[in-house]
Each structure stands twice: as structure tokens, then as C-alpha cells.
Amino acid sequence: MKIKRTSETTESLMNPEAGLWRGLETRLFYMAPTPLNGNPAIKKISPFLEKSTDHGSVKELSVAGVHNGDSLALLLSWPSERNDEIADLDQFVDGVAVMFPLTPNASAVTMGSSGDPVNAWYWKANLDGVAFEVLAEGYGTSARQQGEGKSQVMAGAVHREGRWHVVLSRPMNIGSGRAHFVAGQTARMAFCVWDGGNRERAGRKSFSGDFVPVTLEL
């Protein structure tokens, strides 16, 4: 998969229905339920999560990407009903995330491990134009970063004809401790999707497997 270079402004990239997204190379990821059942690390965190077997209802995710030399933007699209409101304790919202390794040995399957962290951008359907930035070193260690000085991830979302179309974007270089992106070089990514209508949250989700390489056009 190639992340195409564009001269468009970062603001224009945030519209999932903008013309610049049409005709770009798109990769289809086949999603699978996150492996929870029988996982001792998950059981230690939550016996309820460890017994989960009915999550992972989203089976595919379409991904396209561009950069303008300053910001990287990814368009994520998947079939889903619209679950974007929480009116009761047993309701949850849709969500999507893209994860990047911060070391060569970091695993997407376990959300990193001690000494091998990951960095993720995380969008929830009840947020308006913003997203969390997440740092993790394994199951149960996720630390959300949001707000001024903590997260520079922007989001734009549209639900149309039974699908979510979500753009996530962040500056390519924001200092140490986060994923960096360089034009002409390769980055690695993995993806997760939550179906709020299926009561998915936390580890109950679909995921794309371990990191795959993508190339940023020079």
C-alpha cells in the first residue's frame, strides 16, 4: 500500500467525501476478533473480557492514505449501522483505531509489551472532530492522550449508505515518544474496529492482525 503525496491542505484532507480521496489506492483488510478467550493476560485484567467470544462483528476495513509533507491522513471505511449515542449504561458507540509500533519488536496483537510500546490514533463515534492519541505497552496499559498539548490527532467522519467513512490525521513529526513518518520511507500500521451495536468496547473488537508496511510517497 502506498501513501500518496498531495499538495492539498491538512484542513481539506479532513473531509471523507472530498474529491481527493477518489481514485486513490485502497487496501482491504480482513478483520478478525481480537483473541481474548483463554488469554491469561486478559483474564488477569478482566475475567469477563477473557470469556468474550461474540465480539469482532466487523469483517472488513478499507484503508487509503495521503500526506502533504506535514501531515499524514488515513481514510478508514467499513460497513456498520450508526451507533453514535450513549443513552444508557448498556449502550456503546462505534470506533476505529490505527496503531503504529514504536520499536521494531512491538506487537500489534498484544498492543505492545514492556519496553516495546505502540502508539495509536483512536476515534469514537460520539466525539466531534477530535480523537484520542494512545500509548500502550501491552494489554491493560493504554493511556489516552487528549486535549491541548497531548493529542494533535484530528478526525472527520461521515456515515452514509450503511458505512462509516472516517479520516484520521496528525502531523508527521511531533517530537519524541510518538510515531514519526518520513516521506520516501516505510511505516507500519495495524487497525482495530469496534461495533457499538454489538456492545464492543475495550478489548472486544475486530483487528487486522500484526503490523503491515506502507510506503509514503516522496
Image (cartoon, rainbow, N blue to C red):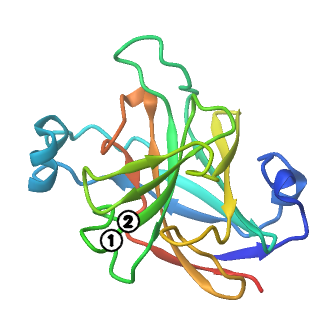
218 lies above or below 115: below
Query: At 81% from the left edge and 55% from the top edge, which residue is drawn?
Result: 13
Query: At 67% from the left edge and 82% from the top edge, which residue is drawn?
Result: 182
Which image quarter: residue 162?
Answer: top right
Q: Nearer the viewer, mark 2 or mark 1?
A: 1
Mark found first going from the N terminus, 2 or 1: 1
Label 2 secondary element: loop
Q: Is residue 74 visible?
A: no
Q: State the quadrant of the N terminus.
A: bottom right
Which image quarter: residue 196?
Answer: top left
**Label 2 is placed on what type of residue?**
Gly
Left or right relative to 89: residue 53: left
Q: Which mark is residue 99?
A: none
Q: State the quadrant of the C terminus.
A: bottom right
How far is disc 2 from disc 1 in space, using C-alphas? 9 Å
Task: Tell me the residue that label 1 is attached to.
Answer: 107
Q: Which mark is residue 209?
A: 2
90 lies above or below 43: above
Image spot of residue 150 (x, y percent): 55, 51
Left or right relative to 12: residue 27: left
Image spot of residue 97 (x, y percent): 50, 52
**Label 1 is placed on what type of residue?**
Ser
